[in-house]
Image (spheres, rainbow, N blue to C red):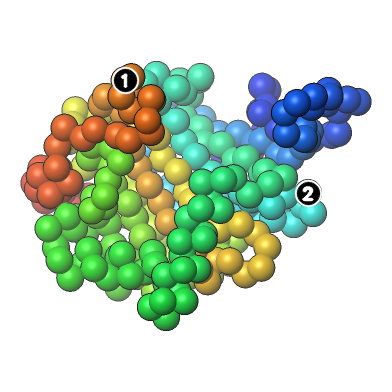
Amino acid sequence: MRVVCNKYPVLLDEMPAAVGEPGAFRQVEPAVGRHEVIVETPIHDAELAGFGSDEMLEVLQTVRERFAAAAADPRIEHVVIFRNQGRLAHASLPHPHSQLAGLPFVPPFIAQVLERSRTYAAECGAVLLLGMAKAEVEDGARLLDTTERLATFVPFAAAHDNEIWIVPRQLPPRFDRVDDQDLRELGDAVRRATRVLAVALGNPDYNLMLHTAPLGGATERLLPWYLQIIPRCAVSAGFEMGIGVRILTTAPESAAQTLRSAFRKVAGL
C-alpha cells in the first residue's frame, strides 16, 4: 500500500502567489489544503469486494493514519475520504485507490447537516444519526445487516437508488481514534456491502464516502462518522439538476428487499 500526493490536486499544499480579485462576487480565497491518493494494493485489477478481512483492516488503518495527519494540520477544518470505482463514478484511474481531501473550510453541506443535528439534539436530547440507525434497526424494512456496533441499511430518505449507509449504533470516537477492533468490524461491513451490490446489481460502478464531522469544537458528538455507498446505475437529468430534487426509480424498501436477498449469498464470506 502507498500514499502519494494527487498529481492533479483540487487543493494546493502552498499558498499561491495570487488568487485574483473577487469583483462583484464574494471574497475569493486560495484552495490550500491536502489532496492525497491511497493506493490500496499493487494488484491492478483488484476490487474492494474481493479484499480479505486483513486487507480491508490495513486499508482502514492507513485511512485512520492519514486522517490523523490531516487533522493535525492547522490549516485543515474538514476531512473527507472517498473512493470512485469505475468510469460512471468518475474514476480517473483504473488502479484501485481512494482519496483524502483536507479542506480549509467546512463545506456548506456538512454545515447544514451539523445544524440539523444541533437542532435535533436540542429538541430530543439525542444524536440524530444514532437515532436514524436505531429507527432503521427497529423498523427493519430497509435494514440489511446489524451488529452490536454498526447498522447497514438503505436510508428511509435515500437520494440514490440502492444506496447503502453503514452507521454506528453507539457514539464512536473521532475517526482517527477508532481502535483496530472497530476498524475490522467496519471493514467487514464494507466488504459485505460491496459484495452485495456486485451480486444484486451486476457489479456496478459506485462512489464510497466516509463522512466525518468538522474538526473543530468536538462536533463528532453531534455528527458521528458514517459511510455511504452510492451505486452509479443512473445519471442525473434536467429535473434533478434544475431543482436539486432527485427521482428514485426504486422505493428504498424494495431496494432493501433485493439487496437482502443478495446479502444472504455473501453473509458467510
Q: Residue at x 55, y 66 (%)?
A: 220
- Tag nearer the camera, 1 or 2: 1
Q: Going from the N terminus, do you reach mark 1 or mark 2 first?
A: 2
**Left or right: residue 21 compared with residue 46:** right
Element type at mark 2: loop
Residue 194: image location, x then y, percent: 29, 41
Q: Quadrant of the N terminus?
A: top right
Does residue 195 show up? no
Closer-to-camera residue (256/26): 26
Residue 42: image location, x then y, percent: 51, 30
Q: Is residue 188 above or below residue 241?
A: below
Q: What residue would you read off at disc 2?
A: 75
The reply to whether the C-beta atoms of the residues labelled 1 and 2 are less than 8 Å apart is: no
Does residue 213 show up? yes
Q: Residue at x 22, y 40 (%)?
A: 162
Furthest-right residue in view?
17
Q: Amino acid at mark 1?
A: Ala
**Left or right: residue 55 compared with residue 249:** right
Residue 98: image location, x then y, percent: 51, 36
Q: Amino acid at mark 2?
A: Arg
* Res 182 label: none
Residue 123: image location, x then y, percent: 41, 76
Q: What residue would you read off at disc 1?
A: 237
Closer-to-camera residue (132/93): 132
Q: Is residue 135 above or below residue 163?
A: below
Q: Residues within 10 Å of mark 2 (few under 14, many from 20)?
A: some
Q: Is residue 19 above or below residue 67?
A: above
Q: Residue at x 58, y 66 (%)?
A: 219
Furthest-bottom residue in view?
125
**Left or right: residue 266 compared with residue 1:** left
Q: Residue at x 25, y 26 (%)?
A: 233
